[in-house]
Image: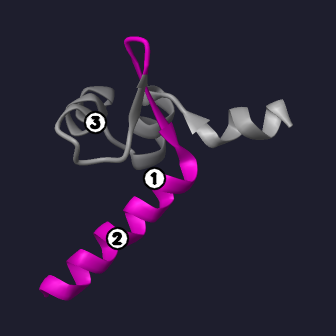
Amino acid sequence: MKELMAEQILTVKQVADYLKVNERTVYRMATAGKIPAFKVGASWRFKQTEIEKWIKEQSNDSNGNT
């Protein structure tokens, strides 16, 4: 169970790698509330399911604006 939970929570580096962007970009987006994130102490963390949902929402927004 612990392994499953650990896989679902991502670090800034993991999200940056996943989205193919710089880590600084992920920090900026998290701080601005543009990407679903939460803090554990001073560190940002991300639920993988929320990131995947957010990606789909971004894709839907793009499709609706063209």
Q: Which mark is residue 63?
A: none
Mark 2 Cα-neighbour bin, 10 Å: few <14, some 14–19, many ≥20? few
Q: Name the spot of residue 39 as percent of width and height, x first.
A: 40, 24
Amino acid on which the number 2 mark rests in the picture = Glu
Overall secondary structure of the magenta section? helix
Q: How many C-alpha atoms fall within 10 Å of the one at disc 3: few (<14), some, or many (≥20)? A: some
| Residue 54 at x, y percent in the picture | 38, 60
- Mark closest to the chain's N terminus, 2 or 3: 3
Tell me the kind of residue under disc 1: Ile
The residue at the point 22 percent across, 31 percent down is: 31
Instruction: Report the side of 54 relative to 33 (left or right).
Output: right
Q: Which residue is mark 2?
A: 57
- Given residues 33 and 25, the one toward you in this image is 33
Task: Say which amino acid is labelled 3.
Answer: Ala
Range covered by the magenta-colored residues = 40-66
Circle 1 crowding by C-alpha within 10 Å: few under 14, some 14–19, many from 20: some
Q: Which residue is mark 1?
A: 51
N-terminal of the two: label 1 or label 3? 3
Residue at the spot x=50%, y=28% of the render?
11
In space, the residues marked 1 and 2 are separated at their CA atoms by: 10 Å
Mark 1 and mark 2 lie on one chain; the one further toward the N terminus is: 1
Q: What kind of element bears circle 2? A: helix
Q: Secondary structure at mark 1?
A: helix
Distance in Å between CA atoms under marks 2 and 3? 16 Å
Is residue 52 shown in magenta?
A: yes
Q: Which residue is mark 3?
A: 30
